[in-house]
Image (cartoon, rainbow, N blue to C red):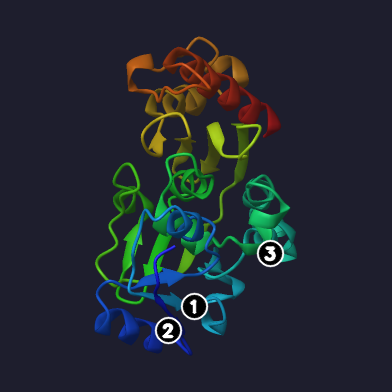
Amino acid sequence: MFSLNYVRAKSLKHAAELLAQNPEAKLLAGGMTLLPTLKQRLARPSHLVDIAAIGALRAIRPSKGKLSIGAGVRHYEVASSPIVRQAIPALACLAGLIGDPQVRNMGTIGGSLANNDPAADYPAAALALNATIVTDRRRVKAGDYFQGLFATALEEGEIITRVLFPLPKQAAYEKFPHPASGYAMAGVFVAVTARGVRVAVTGAGPGVFRWNAAERALGRSLSPDAVAKLSLPADEMNEDIHASREYRANLVNVMTRRAVAKL
């Protein structure tokens, strides 16, 4: 690991000031992605700005028909929160499936969305539920926020403060996890909303995406059979030593059917 400066931000304003003063600084919340990157010398920030102790980022509360979750809320807190379990049980379920106990006790929802790993779980929930990512500068709809492999709409020095999830009529999440990392080799979040069915897929492609054909089919009939004969173009899927493109395309269909069955 390269040498760097560690600073613990006292407030959101303090964190923003530190980022403005140090262009090569990086935010540290849970550190589940950043710390391994530093250990492998794949990044060389001048400062680590620790925002984990900022209370304003740790709240979970109802908010005008939506669920507000602070960016600093850890995965295990989302999974175990009575408020989340009552408002959006599928989101609590998703959080409980992330990584392992060590990751769930340190990783944060804001860190996951800021990193936008193509196999992360939260992007599927955010996109399927049409969530709003709130930063210290503005609000961004999930459909505009996710911009491909590790790419987001965040600007330099912009900090996610909370995420607003509209409450669905029903929702369910199913994923096929990698046996070692727990990342999704294919994960599907199905949400039944006032404006129809939304299906978001993570892990299978270079970034989270909506499966429009499945949404149309489920809008006509909310049953696993409605999507049984649908298929995704395999050439648009990821391929690695763990799964071929064709295998991942099939996994998406299987996880979609399981999620709908769970509804």
Query: Looking at the picture, does residue 117 appear above or below residue 110?
Result: above
Q: Earlier in the sequence, mark 1 or mark 3?
A: 1
> Does the residue at mark 1 contact the one at mark 2 (Cβ under 8 Å)?
yes
Tag 3: amino acid: Glu
Instruction: Please tell me how crowded label 3 is: few (under 14), some (14-19), or many (20+) other residues with Cα within 10 Å.
Output: some
Residue 118: image quadrant is: top left
> Does the residue at mark 3 contact the one at mark 2 (Cβ under 8 Å)?
no
Q: Which residue is mark 2?
A: 12
Residue 98, image x, y percentages: 63, 47
Tag 2: amino acid: Leu
Residue 29, image x, y percentages: 51, 69
Q: Which residue is mark 1?
A: 51
Q: Residue at the spot x=41%, y=29% of the render? A: 211
Q: Which residue is mark 3?
A: 77
Q: Could one spot residue 160 in this view of the protein? A: no
Could you give the CA–CA distance between mark 3 and mark 2, rounded to whole angstroms? 21 Å
